[in-house]
């Protein structure tokens, strides 16, 4: 990967979530780099080496990189100044920069987003299902929550949801879709919300016909496991038959035979549940007891 490619990726994934706590209220899409200098300097150091450097700008600490005697500063525009004086810098070790719990957490999240973005690029370049799907419009195939211990695995992008809004479970007006309402009620039973969990689709693009679900899920399986390898969830809730079939290599006669049971696959705890679509009479009633009896702490040994 080249420097300009990393910079382009970062521009698309900066967020309030990865912003320095004291700057979160001021962060906005017109000043995306605000509060990101330390974790960006760490990422650049990850991929390209060199030194992590620190200066003061108007009394504010600012981090940048020097690689082969060249100054690399992806976040300088946050200061809105004509020129930055880099002469009085000090070199910082990775240990010094990461010796802060919040910085470390934000760095890990930004690093994860970069890696998943690179996987999304591979997904966009895939043509195995070219005559069976429509490509995802914004190339994002992972919805990020506040913590990644729990991943919800869906079947495929919904026509009226993520495919149009860019946000899982919500419509273009940021209103929860019917399936999202059901899922939210279920997650509330274990003191979680949709916003707490990560969400991934087993099929990354939009199948133009449900008859292609099986073939597309087979073609997408490698990408799914690439994403899971980076996210490293402790629990995966697979929604419905199709999503479960993609990730769970277990023979069963009926889907109900595996619903609510815990399976260990490649170190992941997988729990199949009925899809929360309100079309199904089991969407809530079939899952309610599962969630009421679900103790994530016991399952994952937190």
Image (spheres, helix red, strand yellow):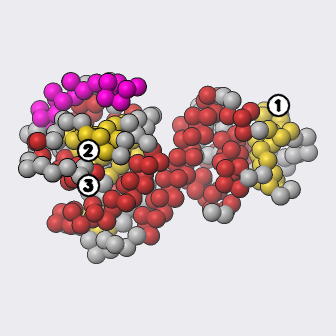
Q: Which mark is residue 238?
A: 2
Magenta stretch, overall SS: helix
Mark 3 to mark 1 CA distance (whole Å): 53 Å
Instruction: Compare marks 2 and 3 and give the one earlier in the sequence.
Output: 2
Residues under numbered marks 2 and 3 in contact, where contact means CB atoms less than 8 Å apart: yes
Helix, strand, or loop for circle 2?
A: strand
Residue stretch rendered in magenta on the structure = 283-302
- Who's the residue at 61% across and 30% down the image? 102
Q: Nearer the viewer, mark 1 or mark 2?
A: 2
For label 2, the crowd category at 10 Å Cα-Cα, with few meaning under 14, some 14 to 19 and many 20 or more, is many
Q: Where residue 294 sits in the image (x, y, percent)?
A: 25, 26
In the image, residue 169 sits, relative to residue 61, either above or below, namely below
Residue 157 in sight here: no
Apparent side of residue 7 relative to residue 126 in the rendered image (left or right) = right
The quarter of the picture where the C terminus appears is: top left
Q: Nearer the viewer, mark 3 or mark 1?
A: 3
Residue picked out by circle 3? 246
Mark 2 to mark 3 CA distance (whole Å): 9 Å
- Who's the residue at 68% across and 60% down the image? 3
Q: Where residue 254 sits in the image (x, y, percent)?
A: 8, 47
- Who's the residue at 86% across and 56% down the image? 69
Residue picked out by circle 1? 59
Instruction: Determine if the magenta segment contains residue 291.
Output: yes
Helix, strand, or loop for circle 3?
A: helix
The quarter of the picture where the N terminus appears is: bottom right
Helix, strand, or loop for circle 1?
A: loop
Mark 1 to mark 2 CA distance (whole Å): 50 Å
Apparent side of residue 143 relative to residue 271 in the rendered image (left or right) = right
């Amino acid at each position: 990967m080249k420097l300009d490619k990393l910079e382009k990726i970062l521009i698309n994934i900066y967020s309030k979530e990865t912003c320095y706590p004291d700057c979160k209220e001021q962060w906005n899409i017109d000043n995306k780099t605000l509060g990101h200098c330390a974790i960006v300097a760490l990422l650049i150091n990850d991929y390209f080496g060199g030194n992590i450097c620190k200066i003061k700008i108007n009394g504010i600490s600012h981090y940048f990189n020097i690689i082969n005697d060249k100054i690399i500063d992806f976040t300088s525009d946050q200061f809105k100044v004509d020129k930055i004086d880099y002469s009085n810098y000090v070199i910082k070790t990775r240990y010094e920069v990461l010796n802060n719990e919040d910085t470390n957490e934000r760095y890990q999240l930004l690093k994860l987003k970069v890696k998943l973005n690179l996987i999304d690029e591979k997904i966009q370049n895939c043509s195995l299902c070219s005559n069976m799907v429509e490509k995802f419009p914004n190339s994002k195939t992972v919805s990020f929550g506040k913590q990644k211990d729990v991943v919800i695995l869906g079947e495929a992008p919904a026509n009226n949801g993520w495919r149009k809004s860019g946000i899982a479970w919500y419509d273009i007006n940021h209103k929860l879709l019917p399936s999202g309402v059901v899922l939210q009620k279920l997650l509330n039973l274990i003191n979680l919300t949709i916003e707490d969990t990560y969400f991934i689709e087993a099929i990354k693009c939009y199948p133009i016909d449900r008859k292609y679900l099986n073939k597309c899920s087979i073609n997408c399986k490698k990408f799914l496991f690439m994403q899971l390898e980076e996210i490293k969830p402790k629990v995966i809730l697979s929604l419905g038959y199709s999503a479960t079939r993609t990730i769970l290599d277990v023979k069963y006669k009926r889907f109900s035979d595996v619903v609510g049971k815990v399976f260990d696959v490649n170190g992941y705890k997988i729990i199949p549940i009925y899809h929360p679509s309100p079309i199904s009479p089991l969407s809530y009633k079939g899952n309610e007891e599962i969630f009421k009896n679900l103790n994530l702490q016991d399952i994952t040994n937190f």
